Amino acid sequence: MGRLSGFEYREIIKRLKRLGFKFDRQAAGSHEIWFNPETRRYTTVPNHPGDMPEGT
């Protein structure tokens, strides 16, 4: 798999919404929980300033 550059929070949220995820709740600190009702999967997204490195 090729190397990816970092992603901004807004870009991650845009992609999650396109995949059917919806904001579920605020988690500890600056993290958010997103839920996809079709696949019944959750994901945690850190909301930090600047780019998030690959693998975060």
Image: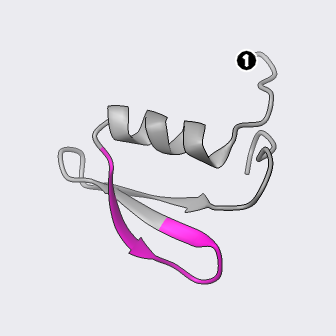
Residue type indicated by callout 1: Met
Helix, strand or loop at label 1? It is loop
* Residue at image location 32% in from the left, 47% down from the top: 21
Residue that sits furthest to the bottom in the current view: 28
Would you name the residue on which mark 1 appears?
A: 1
4 over 14 or under it: above or below: above
Give yes or no for residue 29 being in the magenta stretch: yes
Residue 2 figure quarter: top right
The residues colored magenta run 21-32
* Residue at image location 46% in from the left, 77% down from the top: 26
Q: Position of residue 38 (x, y in %)?
A: 18, 45
Asked whether, in this view, residue 37 is left or right of residue 47, the answer is left
Q: Quadrant of the N terminus?
A: top right
Q: Position of residue 18 (x, y in %)?
A: 35, 32
* Residue at image location 70% in from the left, 37% down from the top: 7
Asked whether, in this view, residue 55 is left or right of residue 29, the answer is right
* Residue at image location 51% in from the left, 79% down from the top: 27
